[in-house]
Image (cartoon, rainbow, N blue to C red):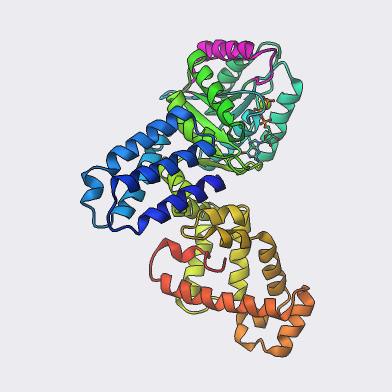
Amino acid sequence: MFEALTDNIRSVLRKISGRGRLSEKDVAEACRELRLALLQADVNYQVAREFIRHIEQRAVGQEVAESLTPGQQFGKIVHEEMTALLGGESASLRYRSKPPSVFMLVGPQGGGKTTTCAKLALHLKHHGQHPLLVGADVKRPAAIEQLRVLAGQAEIPAFEASQTDDGTALAREAVSFAAGKGLTPVIIDTAGRLHSDDEMMQEASNMKDALAPDEVLLVVDAMTGQDAVNMGKQFQERVGLTGCIVTKLDGDARGGAALSLRHVTGQPIKFAGTGEHLGDLEPFHPDRMASRILGMGDVLTLIEKAEEAWDEKQAKRTEKRLRTGQFNLADFLEQMEKMTHMGPIERLAELIPGLPSGLRAQVDESAVKVAKAVIESMTRGERENPEIIDGSRKKRIAHGSGANVQQVNQLLRQFAQMKTMLRGLSAGKRPARLPIRWL
Ligand SMILES: Nc1nc2c(ncn2[C@@H]2O[C@H](COP(=O)(O)OP(=O)(O)OP(=O)(O)O)[C@@H](O)[C@H]2O)c(=O)[nH]1
Ligand SMILES: [Mg+2]
């Protein structure tokens, strides 16, 4: 995510972090480079200018001058300002006291509305809610079918309309249906492809007037850069928004849209889409995103992902096995499988602080596949007690898994390292469950 931006900012911060004292010239130089990095990432010109102005004001002031580590203090200021730019506090969804709550997703064509409706519904279902999906893109039967298919995959009810030519009437009907069935929230997918943007916004605005939704969420594709931001501004003016969802952060978006959207629309980013799968939606936390952009990782999101993928009972069992020194390659394999459920490893690697970019590139799924194949070629005894694996066993395992002896050795070494690390951590709390070191 935002690789070039992260690399550029890191290099500015690296240069400045070792300094014992910062002159105004040093600050000016760092700010100039930061500004350039932002503009190259397609951040709105005014947003970049204001961001830098804040940093400059603080960096030449007391805060830095009196700090024992001015370079690091500068980095802290950049992190804080980036967090503020992304909205400061995390923003949650608004619900009405008498359900069903109503969420409308709006936005330009192809931004990801339909997909995001289903992702959001699934996310909320995982948090104990009972959503109803409503396809109100009535001009395109294919769009309603698309939502129905996604709803089926997520095992979430999709509203079957009795009439289909008026999106607003359909949505109204869906809300009373939900009220009768105790379903909430009602998540409404709207049209992105009409004759003109004008017509699209008019329709969204009419629907909003009729339904008085609790959330009007703008869904925009981060890869469309400043176009997305301009559309966001128009939607805010014409329809009125309560929040934004940025999609396709997994692609090669430069970051400009995500960084400018909050400032330009005045509305918080509430979620981020990070892939094509229904599970690829994350609540948006400005401080965590700032950490990720600055290359500082995002351990909290990593832990949350781990917790979603892991069941508590199993985690307890693993912890116990660690404590009692029973943790073996079979557990290792089990963990690896769990981890592949958390999403592509490269993306998880972004969440781990301090991984240099070169190392990130080495963390690929094929390495995990090899490791899995190697472990699967072992006998049960070998998995439970890797010490018995001698030269001839290594050859057999390598042969059986399609790997070479070196790879078998490497895996055994990594396992030993991980075991040592986990044993050290197992006295502590949550990180003990995170098998990150073997990366
Ligand atoms: N990689 C990636 N693809 C996404 C993400 N969100 C949506 N997509 C893809 O983007 C494409 C368009 O998504 P839709 O949900 O159909 O977009 P839409 O806004 O409903 O489109 P219209 O209804 O035509 O305006 C689909 O192929 C989705 O799979 C994401 O976060 N990451
Ligand atoms: Mg759609």
Q: Residue at x 65, y 33 (%)?
A: 115
Q: Quadrant of residue 268?
A: top left
Main secondary structure type of the part rendered in magenta: helix
Residue farthest toward the front in the current orientation of the protein = 25
The verdict on residue 140 being magenta is no
Q: Quadrant of ligand 1?
A: top right
The verdict on residue 195 being magenta is yes
- Does residue 93 appear anywhere in the picture? no
Residue 41 locus on image (x, y percent) = 53, 39
Q: Residue at x 62, y 63 (%)?
A: 362
Q: Split into 4 quadrants, where in the image is the C terminus?
A: bottom right
Residue 270 vs 320, above or below: the answer is above
Residue 138 vs 407, above or below: the answer is above
Residue 311 locus on image (x, y percent) = 53, 57
Horizontal relation, residue 247 to residue 424: left or right: right
Work out whether residue 205 or residue 79 is closer to the camera in this orientation and state it: 79
Q: Please report the bounds of the magenta region as a residue range.
A: 191-215
Horizontal relation, residue 363 to residue 29: left or right: right
Residue 419 locus on image (x, y percent) = 51, 75
- Does residue 350 appear anywhere in the picture? yes
Residue 402 locus on image (x, y percent) = 78, 73
Q: Quadrant of residue 278?
A: top right
Work out whether residue 367 or residue 355 is closer to the camera in this orientation and state it: 355
